Image: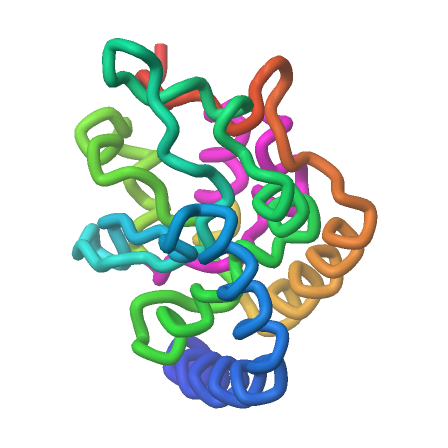
Amino acid sequence: MYTYIKQILDIFVAFTVLLFISPIFILITILLFIANNGYPYYFQKRPGKNESVFTICKFKSMNDKKDASGKLLPDAERITKVGAFVRKTSLDELPQLLNVVKGDMSFVGPRPLMVSYLELYNKKQKRRHSVPPGITGWAQVNGRNAISWEQKFEYDVWYVNNQSFILDFKILLLTVKKVFKTEGISAADNATMPRFEGSI
């Protein structure tokens, strides 16, 4: 029952928030349009509930600069000043409100990861796809990119087994706290989380 009520609340709140923050949304779009040579958004296929694939939308924090051989430069060298700011403040996640309105995502749930990771999950880890993915989640408020993949998936599966209105409300409050403290944005020695290569 809660899952149906949750989806209705998600869509209503996401639409309301989008209307309220539209000036900020437009301003960030313009700044990133300039910083990224006309490409303010980042689109990528991600697996959602039951591993159905959808297109996620985020503000693009990195440019597409390449080395002499045509290979993209390391993430740390491609993050623009504006991009670093939107990542630090988690404003890069705002366009995902559109995914929530469409029903692809929820405010709270396991983060949607790469489609290529699907074949790498073990049976227990695959349970993270039994609920809609979220903009924030239990793993995000317990370390975000500063914890290992195994820890992240343990938190995701725990959330799936224990989701409730009270837990979701707690995660949203903790997310606000994390945003203001800018904790766990980067993994150790990396500007972003390293690729998942499968569990041992």
Residue 103 versus residue 197 in the image, above or below:
below
**Residue under the image location 50 percent in, 65 percent down:** 29
Residue 139 versus residue 31 in the image, above or below:
above
Image spot of residue 35 (x, y percent)? 51, 48
Query: Does 148 sit left or right of 134 as displayed?
Result: right
Total numbered circles: 0
Picture quarter with the N terminus: bottom left
Residue 150 shows up from this direction: no
Picture quarter with the C terminus: top left
Residue 152 versus residue 156 in the image, above or below:
above
Q: Quadrant of residue 57?
A: bottom left
**Residue under the image location 28 percent in, 17 percent down:** 71
Image spot of residue 82 (x, y percent)? 62, 47
Residue in front for this viewpoint, 94 or 54: 94
Residue 89 shows up from this direction: yes
Q: Which residues are magenta?
A: 131-157
Q: Quadrant of residue 176?
A: bottom right
Image spot of residue 181 (x, y percent)? 82, 46
Asked which colour scheme the image uses, the reply is: rainbow
